[in-house]
Image (cartoon, rainbow, N blue to C red):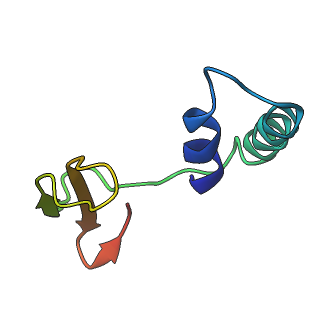
Amino acid sequence: MFRIFLCACFQACPKELHVSTVKCIFCYSHGTIDLGLWYPKGSELSLINYSDIDFARCKFDRKSTSRTCHFLESSLVS
């Protein structure tokens, strides 16, 4: 996920390093195509989201920043 985020930051002007990283991401995705999450039918799952938003406090460019985390039951998923 981190590599995908970094490549997305440079999608307007990619360099050779970014292209090779995207190829690695595709190879990884192809090798894990049979993996996934399984949830039993009728099970109750709780999704809990937390966010931290900071409005224009960045000292360098005065942009707003936000961070989030998501828990499925007691496991951090994002």
The number of numbered badges drawn on the structure is: 0
Q: Give left or right: position of 6 versus 47.
A: right
In-front residue for pair 40/67: 67
**Does residue 47 sit above or below 7 in this rendering?**
below
- Measured as percent of width and height from the top left, residue 30 is found at 79, 37
Query: Residue 9: which quarter of the image?
Result: top right
Q: In the depicted view, which residue is nearer to us: 2 or 65?
A: 65
- For the point 65% across and 38% down, the residue is 7
The residue lying at 20 percent from left, 59 percent from top is 43
Q: Is residue 64 above or below residue 47?
A: above
User: In the image shown, does 33 or 57 lie closer to the viewer?
Assistant: 57
Which of the 4 image quarters holds residue 16?
top right
Q: Residue at x 44, y 54 (%)?
A: 38
Furthest toward the front, the residue is: 60
Q: Position of residue 19 (x, y in %)?
A: 83, 31
Of residues 31 and 43, the one drawn nearer to the viewer in this rendering = 31
